[in-house]
Image (tube, rainbow, N blue to C red):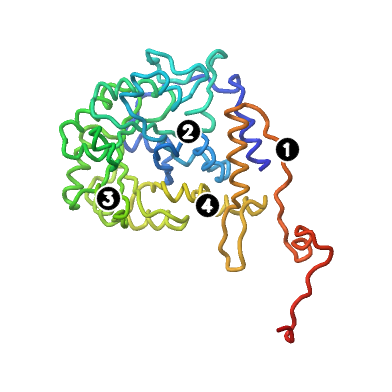
Amino acid sequence: MGQLSQQLESHVSPESLPPPIKRPKLIGRAFYESLGSPKYILAPMVDQSEFAWRLLSRSFLTPSRQPSLLAYTPMLHARLFKETQSFRDHHFQPIRTGLPSPPQASPEIPSNGEQPPYLDGHPTHDRPLIVQFCANNPDELLQAAEYVAPYCDAVDLNLGCPQGIARKGHYGSFLQESPNLIHSVISKLAQDLSVPVTAKMRILDTKEETLQYANLLLDAGASWIAVHGRRREQKGHETGLADWKVIRYLRDMLPKEIVIFANGNILRPEDLDECLEVTGADGVMSAEGNLCDPGIFAGEDGRKEGEKTGEYWKGRDGKGGWRMDAVMRRYLDILYRLVLEKEPPMRKPLSTPSTVEDIHLNLGSKSPPVQPTDSTP
């Protein structure tokens, strides 16, 4: 935990930030490469992939690898974000005073003492970051996106939400039947927004229809596509497995310069590289797997660091996992230091017994148990 504490403490002073540098707007693979070509992506999750969770997920990676994790915000409603100050303040807090209205024209984070970075999109620990919106109106989405553009790397259009509320609001996967509208929404941002636009989609009934759909998004100006390998109907008790073969078909049929992320069936760390191998995608995205295991992206080097601190334990069979109390400490430390901006309370060190005597001592016994022998029943 000491290493995490140092990382959290090192960013606070706005004076330590470099002055903003204006860069040309990159798109497509050039944009992806400018972010370091991240292979692992924390998926957009409603009410889940918020600031503290993103930092928690990044914290399990070694410091040198943390910028390689691309993260998405939860899906935000574009119309509500555009119209309602309280909605913006509640869901996106890049500066303490709230987002200025009208939104800033400059795509750079203010670095002066009056407007230091605060939470979402902080340049030293919450990047690269994609802000995702649901929308069905080009102008509304552009106006919402202009608020967040100074504090993120791109804006994503949600075309995957399969829930009833998306059907009622005519957004998410229920825009599939409105290709002209989808094209106009994406092309509006591609032309007028200061940062790139991307799209997250689901597969359709056939691989050929899915390819046609993907080409629609790319032709409209999406810099990359994230493909959930399930159809819109696959939800709830009918969720089933994601079809990696369809994602592989897209990879084989689309030009190599097109960036594709694969989504679906990622429940364990070993699923990440298997998905990349099977689909040929540039990156792999995890949602539920990340919620079950926020250290899913840690990698072998991150897990080894966790073993040193007693946060990651392995059994005799070689299988291991992150201790829940250690995960909760990390999460609370993030809230204390970055949100409340004060030191967390002192806690006892995490216990890491390694011998029979140590285990017995922790249980309060005065002497170790009698070891069984061959004659012991």
Q: Name which of mark 2 and mark 1 comes first in the sequence.
A: 2
User: How far apart are the two marked residues, 2 and 4, measured between alpha carbons?
Assistant: 19 Å
In the image, which disc is placed on residue 127?
2
Q: Name which of mark 4 and mark 3 comes first in the sequence.
A: 3
Q: Position of residue 139 (x, y in %)?
A: 25, 21
Which residue is found at the position 71% from the left and 55% from the top? 352
- The answer, for residue 23, to whether it is visible in the render is no
Which residue carries the number 1 mark? 346
The answer to whether 217 is drawn above or below residue 288 in the figure is above
In the image, which disc is placed on residue 299?
4
- Under circle 3, the secondary element is helix
In the image, which disc is placed on residue 251?
3
Q: Position of residue 104 (x, y in %)?
A: 40, 15
- Under circle 1, the secondary element is loop
**How many marks can you see?**
4
Q: Name which of mark 1 and mark 4 comes first in the sequence.
A: 4
Choose between 147 and 232: the one closer to the eye: 232
Q: Name which of mark 3 and mark 2 comes first in the sequence.
A: 2
Q: Position of residue 17 (x, y in %)?
A: 56, 23
User: How far apart are the two marked residues, 3 and 1, measured between alpha carbons?
Assistant: 51 Å
User: How far apart are the two marked residues, 4 and 3, measured between alpha carbons?
Assistant: 25 Å
User: How far apart are the two marked residues, 2 and 1, measured between alpha carbons?
Assistant: 29 Å
At label 4, counting other C-alpha atoms closer than 10 Å, the crowd grade (few under 14, some 14-19, many 20 or more) is some
Amino acid on which disc 2 is placed: Arg
Q: Name which of mark 3 and mark 1 comes first in the sequence.
A: 3
In the image, which disc is placed on residue 129?
none
At label 1, counting other C-alpha atoms closer than 10 Å, the crowd grade (few under 14, some 14-19, many 20 or more) is few
Q: Name which of mark 2 and mark 4 comes first in the sequence.
A: 2
Q: Nearer the viewer, mark 1 or mark 4?
A: 1
